[in-house]
Image (cartoon, rainbow, N blue to C red):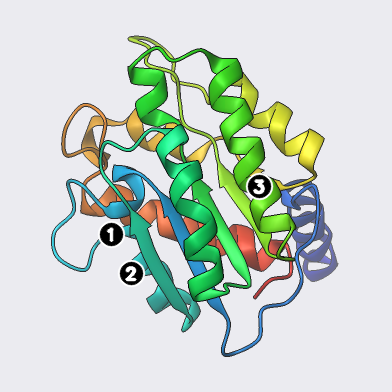
Amino acid sequence: MRKQLLSLIFLALTACSEPSRTLTKLPDDAVILAFGDSLTYGTGASRLSDYPNVLSELTSLEVINEGIPGEISEEGLERLPALLDEYQPKLLILIHGGNDLLRKIPSEQIAANLNKMIEEAAGRHIEVVMLGVPQPNLLILTSADFYQRIAKDRNVLVDLNTLPDILGDNSLKSDMIHPNDAGYQLMAGNIFKLLQEAGAL
């Protein structure tokens, strides 16, 4: 009886945590493209502790780190198509817009650039997972509103909590806006779990 009860609790918890959509299972030779700015590059991490490297270890897949510190979404949009053609990834992990938010670039402009990045991937039949970046705030950190809106409009999987949770915890940060090794480890772990739950792994 106790075993059945525990099984029911487990099923209820996993049902609650299931992502809003599923992904195609990644083949063993799949390439994942991690694309973004300093959060992807790994600013604040020691050698080999950036999230793409940790995610590669967790998945046993090739995860290419194409993060450029300081890049804004307009620059990312210019850079992305050639990388998609070069690496031909099965999955794009998109974390962009943080520098735009810091520079107070209008949210409509950031959203338009992110939408076009997702279009570039979709046009090549590449699935997308996006992480929401929090707006600068001294109190509670939450992902900027447009991330959820884009995910819904484009039907892409989005994680709105990982970065706000990490960047809201000083023990997981190397400075005001970047994780430390423990933060990047958690970031990779959460993405890994999301990919598992969505059926990609």
Residue 17 at what x, y percent from top left?
72, 49
The residue where tag 1 is placed is 50
Residue 185, compared with residue 166, is above or below; it is below
In the image, what residue occupies the spot 26% across and 42% down? 179
* Separation (CA) of disc 1 from disc 3: 23 Å
95 left or right of 152 in image = left
In the image, what residue occupies the spot 54% across and 65% down? 84
In the image, what residue occupies the spot 36% across and 63% down? 65
Q: Could you say whether the residue bearing mark 2 is in a helix, strand or loop?
A: helix
Residue 154, labelled with which disc?
A: none
Q: Quadrant of the C terminus?
A: bottom right
Judging depth in this view, the residue of 88 and 98 nearest the camera is 88
Q: Could you say whether the residue bearing mark 1 is in a helix, strand or loop?
A: loop
75 left or right of 156 in image = left
Q: Nearer the viewer, mark 2 or mark 3?
A: 3
Judging depth in this view, the residue of 28 and 80 nearest the camera is 80
Judging depth in this view, the residue of 131 and 107 nearest the camera is 107
Three-letter code, disc 1? Asp
Three-letter code, disc 3? Ile
Three-letter code, disc 2? Asn
Badge 1: few (under 14), some or many (20 or more) residues near its Cα, within 10 Å?
A: many
The residue where tag 3 is placed is 118
Badge 3: few (under 14), some or many (20 or more) residues near its Cα, within 10 Å?
A: many
Quadrant of the rendered structure where residue 135 is? top left
The residue where tag 2 is placed is 53
Inspect this view and state whether residue 144 appears: no
Marks 1 and 2: CB-CB under 8 Å?
yes
